[in-house]
Image: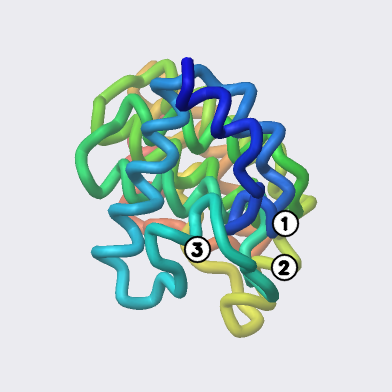
Amino acid sequence: MIGKVFRIFKEKGGILKALDLWDWYEKLDIQKQKIVKYYFSLKSIKSMRFPYRAKHFDSGNVENTYYTKRTFLGSLAQMALLEGDTKNAEWLYLEALKMEGNPLEAHMILNDLLILAQKEKDFDKMEKYAKADVELFDEYKESLKEKNGGTLPHINSFDALIYLLEKKGYYTQALELLSYMERESIPVYEETKIRLKEKSS
């Protein structure tokens, strides 16, 4: 009780203030608050490129951060994923998606969520996150192309959807998606194309 009273009077600073995340953080239950703070502290120890120390989480003056709300929470989710904590990684990624941000940031988060689902072999979640990313493609494709030096890279969500369609026996639909990828200059695996053509004939 006394600790709670003192927290009311504590000056709100740190990365939470810099990113205007205090309201979001204070609405979390105490366990979720501990999770957020834990992965911030762990990232400050383990990541050489992370510019903050544990004290910068909620105190001190943090200026000119290159993070957005979305990318900051996404970076904590990555830390949780690296630690094998898939449950909290997924929660942090989903919280990140709720924050304001651009389509390319959403793509990167959905890609990580898809990787998480693939690790867990959760086909329903694989389909959910892959579909969400594919539906967003038109909004992020130019930014992704620019980031990749003018061409599009392999996009995991498209490959995953083709895999899931093939797994269900929907070979024609898988080939249609593969043709769309070729029209959009998204790299495709030639062996997948050959295999699907053989199965659909």
Residue 139 % position (x, y) = 79, 52
Q: Between residue 166 and residue 140, name the one nearer to us.
A: 140
Q: Residues within 10 Å of mark 3 (few under 14, many from 20)?
A: some
Rounded to the nearest angstrom, the CA distance separating label 1 from label 3 is: 16 Å
Residue mark closest to the camera, 2 vs 3: 2
First in sequence: mark 2 vs mark 3:
2
User: Residue drawn at (40%, 51%), measured in percent from left and top?
Assistant: 40
**Disc 2 to disc 3: CB gap under 8 Å:** no
Q: Residues within 10 Å of mark 2 (few under 14, many from 20)?
A: some
Q: Position of residue 113 (x, y in %)?
A: 44, 37
Q: Earlier in the sequence, mark 1 or mark 3?
A: 1
Q: Could you give the CA–CA distance between mark 1 and mark 2, rounded to whole angstroms?
A: 5 Å
Q: Nearer the viewer, mark 1 or mark 3?
A: 1
Extreme residue in the bottom direction: 149
Q: Which residue is mark 3?
A: 187
Q: Position of residue 75 (x, y in %)?
A: 46, 54
Q: From this view, report whether residue 131 is shown above or below residue 50.
A: above
Q: Residue at x 33, y 23 (%)?
A: 167
C-alpha span from label 2 to label 3: 17 Å
Q: Are marks 1 and 2 in contact (CB under 8 Å)?
A: yes
User: Which numbered circle lies on residue 143?
Assistant: 2
Indicate the amino acid at tag 3. Answer: Pro
Residue drawn at (62%, 76%) of the image:
147
Residue at 33% from the left image edge and 58% from the top image edge:
43
Residue type at the position of mark 1: Tyr
Residue 16 higher or lower than 9, as above or below: below
| Residue 158 visible somewhere in the drawing | no
For label 1, count other residues whose C-alpha is less than 10 Å away and answer few (under 14), some (14-19) or many (20+).
some
In this figure, which residue is indicated by the disc labeled 1?
140
Amino acid type at image mark 2: Ser
- Looking at this view, name the residue that lies furthest to the left: 84
SS of the residue under disc 1: helix
